[in-house]
Image (spheres, coloured by chain):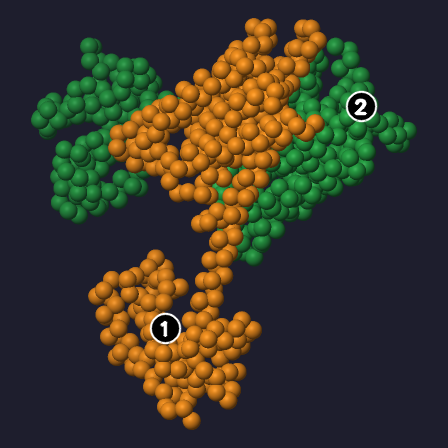
C-alpha cells in the first residue's frame, strides 16, 4: 500500500468512526433527515468562504460550511416551531433553497478566477478521497478526538435527552442546550465528512452505520461502539474498493457498502432481523395450530360424549393434517380406523389447553371493556397474566357454567 | 438586457414555468400529507434508472430514461415502505437510507460509463435549463424545444389526473382514516400520487436537475400554505409562486451570469421568506400584531377594572386592599392601553385624575363581574384553593362571551355566593 492510500485510509476510517458514533444519537432521535438538510445547507457556506477568502485551505472552507449548515438547521427549527410549516417541509425547503444558493455561488467561482479553482469545489459535491492530504487527516483527527471526548464525557446527558426529553426536563437537565450540543456535533462531523463523501451523500454516513448497529443491540453504549466500528469499516472498504478499481468514486462506494451492511443486518440480526423474525413466526404459527387442533379434537370428543371424532371432522386444511401427524408423534393422539383418539397424556394436555381457552372466553364475556389492553389471547393460560383473584373468580365461573373440561375416555373399542 | 426577450430566453422561461407548475401542483399534496421528503427521495432515486436507460439507448432523455426513472421512482417508494414496515427502521431513516443507496448506485454507473457515453453527474444534479432551447423539434412550422413538448404533455397529464381525482386526493390528504372508512383505498391513492411525483420529477429532471426539483416540489406549496387555508387556492397560488420564481430566477441569473436552476431555487426561497414574514394570517408580522393588540386590549380591560374597584372603595363598598396597586402589563403596553381606553371613550381626564365615563363604567362592570364569576367558579367548581383563584380569574376574565357570563352567573347564584357580585 502506498503512502497516499494509507493517508486516505486513515482519514476516512477516523471519519467513519466518529460519524458512526454521533449518528447513533441522530438516528435514535429520529432526526436522520436533519443531517441531510445540514449537509446540503453547508454548500453555500463552503463556496462563500472560497469566494470571500480566495483560499482553498480545508479549514477555511469547512468553517464556512459549518456556519451555513448551522444557519440552515436553525432555520428548520424556527420554521417548524413558529410557523405552520411542518418539520418535513422545513427540512425540504432549507435543503433545496440553500443548495440552490450554493449552485448560484459556485457558478460565480467558475466565472471568476483562474481555471481549476472550480475543480476543487466540485469534489465537495460527490466527494473525492484522493485529494485528502496528511494535513487534512490531522485536522479530521483533531475534530474526531474532540467529538469522541465530548460524547464520552456527556454520555449520560446525551442518553437521557435522546430517549426521554420530558423526563430529562423534569429532572432539570438543560434539554435545549444539550440538544443543540448534539446537533452541533453532528454538524461538525458532517463538515469533516464533506471532502470524502460530498454534500449529497454525507448524511448517509451518519445514518447507515447507526441504523445497522441498531439491529444488533438494545443498549446505547453497545450501539455507539458497534456503529463506530461499522462506520470505520465501511470507510475502509469503500476507500480500498475505490482506490483499486478505476472509475469508482469513493463517496458512493462507501455509501453502498454501508447499504449492504445495513441490509445484511436487517436480514441476519438474531433478534430483530427479518430471517430470525420469520423463523420465530413460523414456529409460533406451528405451535398455535397444534394447540388449536388439540382443542378441537378434545371438544369434538366432548360433544360426542366421549367417542372420538373422525379425521374428517377435525382436519380441514393441509396444514392441519400436518399438525395432526405432529400430535400423533408427540403421543397425544392416535389414529384408529379413521378416528382421532386422545391418548391418556393427550387427554391431560388437551384439558389444559381447553381450560385455558375457556377461561379466556369467560374473561372476555365478563369484562369485554378490559379485553383490549389486558387480553393476550395468544397465551395459552390466563395464569400470570391476569391478577390471581380474577383467575380464581373466572375459574369458579367456568365451573358454575358446567364448562370445566372433565372428559374421560371410554376404553378403546 | 435585450437578450431577455430572445426566443431562447422565452423558451427557457416557458420550460421553467411548466416545470414549476407540474411540481408545485403535485407538491401541494406532498406538503399537506407531510411527505415532502418523499419528493426529495424520489428525485434522487431515479438516477440509476436514468443512467441505465441512457447506457442502453445511448441518449439522454426520451422514452427509455422516462421508463427507467419511473421504475426506480416506484421501487424507491416500495423500498422505503418495506424497510419501514418489515425491516423495522424508522420512517425517516428508511427514506435516507433508500435514496442515498440508490443515488450512489446511479453515480457509480454514471462515473464508470462517463468516458464512453456522454453523460455527466453535474448535469443530473443541477440540470441545464440553458441548454433547453438548443434541442428542438419542428412542429407546425416552428422549432419547439423538446423539453417544452415533454413538460407540456406532463402538465396536461397532471392537470387531468388532479381534476379527475380532486375529491379522492383531497380526502386522502386530509383524513386518510375517513377515506378508508368510506371505501377509498388510501394506499391506491398513495401509489398513484407517488407515480405522479415520479413522472413529474423525471420530466423536470433534465431542465432543473434533481435538487432544484425538490425546491419546486416543496417551497411553492409551503409558501401557498402560509397564505391560504383552501386546497384549490393553495394549488393556484403555488403555481403562481413557482412561475414567478421561474421568470425572476431566469432574469436574475442572466444579470449575474449564474446558474438558472440554482437561481430559481433561491427565488423560491425568497418568496417563501416573504410569506413567512408578511403572510396575512400566518405571517410572523401579523401574528405579532395580533398578539400585541390582544395584550393592549387585555391591559386596557385591566386598567378599567382597577378604576372600577377604586370607585367601589371610594363608595365604601369594599376594603381598600382589594384593589391591585400596579398595572400587570409592561410600561409600553400600559401606555398603549390607556390610549386605547381613551379612544374608545371609556375614560376621561377630570382635573388631575382619570375617571370612568358612563360607557367605560359599563364595560368595567362587565370585566369585574367576569372576574368575580370566574373566581367563584374556580373556588366552587374547580376547587382551587383561595390564594390561587385570583390568578386564574385574572386570566380568564378577558375570555368570556355574554352567553357564557350569564351561564356562569346562574351556576354560581345556585350556590349562594351571589351577593358578592356587582349589580
Specify the chain shown as green: B
Q: Nearer the viewer, residue A158 or B253?
A: A158
Q: Using the image, name the chain to which the residue with label 2 belongs.
A: B
Q: Which residue is mark 2?
A: B133
Q: Residue B379, can we see it? A: yes
Q: Which of label 2 and label 1 is nearer to you?
A: 1
Specify the label residue A353 is tagged with: 1
Residue name at image x 73 percent, y 25 percent: B120
Disc 2 to disc 1, how far (Cα)?
Answer: 77 Å
Q: Position of residue B267 (x, y in %)?
A: 61, 20
Asked if disc 2 and disc 1 are in contact, CB closer than 8 Å, the reply is no
Residue name at image x 29 percent, y 28 percent: A173
Q: Using the image, name the chain to which the residue with label 1 belongs.
A: A
Q: Position of residue A332 (x, y in %)?
A: 41, 78
Shown colour of chain A: orange
Are dots 2 and 1 on a single chain?
no
Residue name at image x 33 percent, y 25 percent: A153
In the drawing, does residue A27 fall left or right of residue A2?
Answer: left
Amino acid at each position: 500500500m502506498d503512502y497516499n492510500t494509507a493517508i486516505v485510509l486513515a482519514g476516512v476510517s477516523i471519519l467513519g468512526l466518529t460519524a458512526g458514533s454521533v449518528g447513533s444519537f441522530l438516528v435514535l432521535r429520529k432526526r436522520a433527515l436533519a443531517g441531510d438538510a445540514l449537509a446540503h445547507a453547508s454548500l453555500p457556506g463552503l463556496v462563500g468562504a472560497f469566494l470571500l477568502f480566495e483560499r482553498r485551505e480545508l479549514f477555511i472552507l469547512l468553517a464556512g460550511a459549518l456556519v451555513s449548515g448551522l444557519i440552515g438547521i436553525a432555520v428548520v427549527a424556527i420554521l417548524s416551531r413558529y410557523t405552520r410549516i411542518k418539520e418535513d417541509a422545513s427540512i425540504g425547503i432549507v435543503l433545496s433553497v440553500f443548495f440552490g444558493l450554493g449552485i448560484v455561488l459556485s457558478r460565480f467561482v467558475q466565472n471568476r478566477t483562474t481555471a481549476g479553482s472550480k475543480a476543487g469545489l466540485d469534489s465537495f459535491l460527490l466527494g473525492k478521497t484522493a485529494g485528502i492530504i496528511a494535513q487534512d487527516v490531522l485536522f479530521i483527527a483533531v475534530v474526531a478526538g474532540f467529538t469522541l471526548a465530548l460524547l464520552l464525557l456527556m454520555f449520560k446527558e446525551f442518553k437521557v435527552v435522546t430517549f426521554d426529553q420530558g423526563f430529562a426536563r423534569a429532572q432539570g437537565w438543560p434539554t435545549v442546550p444539550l440538544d443543540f450540543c448534539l446537533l452541533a456535533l453532528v454538524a461538525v462531523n458532517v463538515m469533516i465528512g464533506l471532502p470524502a463523501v460530498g454534500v449529497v451523500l454525507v448524511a448517509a454516513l451518519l445514518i447507515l452505520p447507526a441504523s445497522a448497529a441498531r439491529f444488533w443491540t438494545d443498549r446505547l453504549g453497545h450501539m455507539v461502539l458497534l456503529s463506530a466500528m461499522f462506520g470505520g469499516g465501511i470507510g475502509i472498504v469503500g476507500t480500498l474498493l475505490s482506490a483499486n478499481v478505476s472509475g469508482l468514486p469513493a463517496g458512493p462506494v462507501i455509501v453502498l457498502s454501508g447499504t449492504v451492511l445495513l441490509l445484511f443486518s436487517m436480514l441476519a440480526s438474531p433478534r430483530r432481523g427479518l430471517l430470525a423474525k420469520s423463523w420465530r413466526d413460523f414456529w409460533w404459527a406451528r405451535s398455535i395450530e397444534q394447540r388449536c387442533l388439540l382443542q378441537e379434537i378434545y371438544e369434538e370428543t366432548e360433544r360426542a360424549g366421549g367417542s372420538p371424532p373422525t379425521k374428517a371432522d377435525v382436519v380441514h386444511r393441509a396444514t392441519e393434517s400436518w399438525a395432526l401427524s405432529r400430535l400423533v408423534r408427540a403421543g397425544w393422539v392416535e389414529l384408529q380406523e379413521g378416528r382421532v383418539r386422545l391418548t391418556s397424556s393427550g387427554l391431560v394436555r388437551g384439558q389444559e389447553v381447553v381450560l385455558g381457552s375457556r377461561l379466556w372466553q369467560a374473561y372476555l364475556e365478563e369484562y369485554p371493556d378490559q379485553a383490549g389492553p389486558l387480553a393476550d389471547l395468544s397465551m395459552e393460560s390466563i395464569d400470570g397474566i391476569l391478577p390471581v383473584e380474577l383467575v380464581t373468580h373466572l375459574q369458579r365461573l367456568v365451573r358454575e357454567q358446567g364448562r370445566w373440561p372433565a372428559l374421560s375416555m371410554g376404553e378403546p373399542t | 438586457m435585450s437578450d431577455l426577450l430572445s426566443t431562447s430566453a422565452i423558451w427557457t422561461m416557458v420550460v421553467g414555468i411548466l416545470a414549476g407548475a407540474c411540481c408545485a401542483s403535485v407538491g401541494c399534496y406532498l406538503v399537506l400529507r407531510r411527505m415532502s421528503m418523499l419528493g426529495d427521495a424520489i428525485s434522487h432515486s431515479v438516477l440509476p434508472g436514468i443512467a441505465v436507460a441512457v447506457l442502453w439507448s445511448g441518449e439522454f432523455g426520451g422514452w427509455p430514461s422516462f421508463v427507467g426513472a419511473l421504475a426506480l421512482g416506484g421501487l424507491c417508494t416500495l423500498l422505503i415502505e418495506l424497510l419501514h414496515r418489515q425491516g423495522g427502521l424508522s420512517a425517516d431513516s428508511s427514506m435516507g437510507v433508500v435514496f442515498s443507496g440508490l443515488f450512489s448506485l446511479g453515480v457509480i454507473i454514471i462515473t464508470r460509463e462517463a468516458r464512453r457515453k456522454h453523460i455527466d453527474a453535474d448535469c443530473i444534479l443541477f440540470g441545464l435549463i440553458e441548454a433547453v432551447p438548443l434541442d428542438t423539434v419542428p412542429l407546425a412550422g416552428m422549432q419547439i424545444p423538446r423539453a417544452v413538448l415533454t413538460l407540456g404533455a406532463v402538465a396536461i397529464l397532471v392537470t387531468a389526473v388532479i381534476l379527475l381525482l380532486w375529491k379522492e386526493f383531497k380526502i386522502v390528504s386530509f383524513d386518510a382514516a375517513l377515506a378508508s372508512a368510506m371505501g377509498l383505498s388510501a394506499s391506491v391513492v398513495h401509489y398513484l400520487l407517488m407515480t405522479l411525483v415520479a413522472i413529474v420529477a423525471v420530466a423536470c429532471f433534465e431542465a432543473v436537475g434533481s435538487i432544484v426539483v425538490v425546491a419546486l416540489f416543496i417551497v411553492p406549496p409551503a409558501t401557498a400554505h402560509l397564505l391560504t387555508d383552501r386546497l384549490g387556492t393553495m394549488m393556484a397560488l403555488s403555481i403562481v409562486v413557482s412561475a414567478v420564481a421561474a421568470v425572476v430566477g431566469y432574469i436574475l441569473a442572466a444579470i449575474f451570469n449564474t446558474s438558472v436552476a440554482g437561481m430559481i431555487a433561491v427565488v423560491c426561497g425568497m418568496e417563501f421568506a416573504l410569506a413567512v414574514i408578511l403572510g396575512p394570517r400566518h405571517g410572523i408580522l401579523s401574528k405579532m400584531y395580533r398578539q400585541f393588540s390582544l395584550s393592549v386590549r387585555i391591559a386596557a380591560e385591566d386598567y378599567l377594572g382597577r378604576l372600577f374597584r377604586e370607585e367601589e372603595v371610594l363608595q365604601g363598598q369594599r376594603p381598600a386592599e382589594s384593589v391591585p396597586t400596579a398595572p400587570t402589563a409592561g410600561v409600553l403596553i400600559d401606555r398603549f392601553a390607556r390610549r386605547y381606553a381613551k379612544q374608545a371613550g371609556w375614560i376621561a381626564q377630570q382635573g388631575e385624575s382619570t375617571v370612568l365615563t358612563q360607557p367605560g363604567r359599563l364595560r368595567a362592570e362587565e370585566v369585574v363581574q367576569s372576574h368575580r364569576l370566574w373566581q367563584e367558579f374556580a373556588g366552587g367548581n374547580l376547587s382551587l384553593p383561595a390564594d390561587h383563584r385570583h390568578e386564574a380569574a385574572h386570566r380568564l376574565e378577558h375570555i368570556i362571551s355574554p352567553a357564557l357570563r350569564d351561564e356562569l352567573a346562574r351556576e354560581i347564584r345556585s350556590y349562594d355566593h351571589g351577593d358578592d357580585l356587582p349589580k
